[in-house]
Amino acid sequence: MNGTTGTPAPGTTGETDRVIVVGSGPTGLLLAGDLAAAGIPVTLLEKRPHKISNLSRAFVLHARALEQLDARGLADDLEAVGRPISRMNLFDGLTLDLGALPSRFNHVLVLPQYEVEKVLERRAAEAGVDFRNDCEVTGLTQDADGVTVHVKGREDLRAAYVVGTDGMRSVVREAVGLPFPGRSAIRSVVLADVLLAEPPETLLTAAAVGDAFAFLAPFGDGYYRVICWHRGRDVPDHEPVDLDEVKEITRLALGRDYGMHDARWMSRFHSDERQVPSYRVGRVFLAGDAAHVHTPAGGQGMNTGLQDAANLSWKLAAVLHGHAAPDLLDTYQSERHPVGRTVLRSSGAIVRLAMAKGWQLPVRAALATALNHLAPARRKAVGQVTGIGYRYPAPRGAHRLTGTRVPDLAPAGGIRLYEALRGGRFVLVTPASYDPGTERADRLTVTRWAGDRRTTVLVRPDGYVAWAAENAQAPDIEKALTTHLG
């Protein structure tokens, strides 16, 4: 099933410009919606009978993911239903203050994953995504012209590209023969959705004492998600969970169980740290948990997957529309794989520090003190957790801004940058008037700086700088647009 050569099977259906996305979690929904909005035929295959489940593990949106959602006109809807917090309390008095973030979203937004999926599904449906539920992918074959996807009990499907966003046990990843190296970082994590007789004092409640760790987050409907773990209890995932176990671990970690009662769901899982060596094999890509998984510390999982999708979607659209050469797709690996590796390491470090014991405790205390008092180290930590601190590789000799994330701007035209990015457009911000021509009007927004800045910046659809120059003249700008927009 993992061959990169072959011939299309007889009886397959599909188009040479279609993309098939496998898995309708947040990553798949964002990616499919982007492609459909760009005019690319998209089929979204989901093994489950229903697209959205309320049994989600993700509960926060960080600043960078909110910026990406803002560029799609979705962030304000989520801000209306979520609950923002501007400080993250970790351990030994270490506090990450997000109020100074250079972002419109200088906070963490607390809301369950299914709320994110609701708005992404609505957008994808409105854009024309072909949703197919109860479709279990069993494998795929690819050749020089496309990919044939095999679906259990259904006719094979044909597409130009396939993206696997089908989670940690990705069938797409297995079909292309990619390993998933790593290890289990935390065994026997317990999950439960419960009502509380005594609501916690803080919106997000987390602590580790001795061998116990517990985390509480509200669903918004009266129920709370409890995530807890005891170092000494290492049992298989299929071992039953009862409410007494949840209460006991929570009391050990938090000092009380808040009167937990009426659990509507309980389960057990293990948390892995894994990453594929390559996010691409021929015409097949991996994103989100299919490409990387890590501990839930820092709440970076869903956020990283959303940013994978934002990076890949505009590149696939540009190649399929003929505006860019196929080698643009290689930059998905070079840009996103290092980010995934860093997230894996940073989330692992957080959980190990939280569960420190013995001689490790003074080391943790010293680190907390250093981060609280050293501004550069604190900014780096906040940048990694929130996602705004990452930059992508730039060609040798490029302007210092190339590859950097662009914060929201309010140029002279009055429209914010992330509003101008909507529709998958590039944005040219320049100190001088410039006419890009009618052939680029649907792919480029041109605006001027509100002040006297002399830097011209071409912003990619995902909000990163594609090109920049000081005192650029019209021929310089035209050359840059031809290079990046075709």
Image: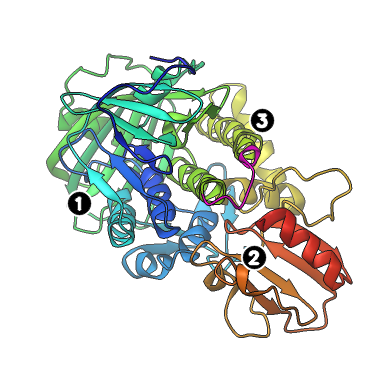
Secondary structure at badge 3 equals helix
Q: Position of residue 302 (x, y in %)?
A: 43, 44
Q: Position of residue 222 (x, y in %)?
A: 19, 57
Residue stretch in magenta: 321-328
Q: Position of residue 338 (x, y in %)?
A: 64, 34
The verdict on residue 114 being magenta is: no
**Rendered image: mark on residue 363:** 3
Relative to the observer, which residue lies in front, 330 or 117? Answer: 330
Classify 10 Å Cα crowding around label 1: few (below 14), some (14-19), many (20 and above): some
Quadrant location of the C terminus? bottom right
**Is residue 359 shown left or right of residue 248?**
right
* Marks 2 and 3, how far apart at CA: 35 Å
Residue identifier under label 1: 223
**Marks 2 and 3: which is nearer the front?**
2
* Marks 2 and 1, how far apart at CA: 35 Å
Which of disc 1 and disc 2 is earlier in sequence?
A: 1
Which of disc 3 and disc 2 is earlier in sequence?
A: 3
Q: Hey, what amino acid is under mark 2?
A: Pro
Q: Is residue 384 above or below residue 484?
A: above
* Residue in the image at 51% along x and 50% along y: 317
Residue identifier under label 2: 407
Secondary structure at badge 1 equals loop
What secondary structure is the stretch in magenta mostly built from?
A: loop
**Is residue 218 shown left or right of residue 240?**
right
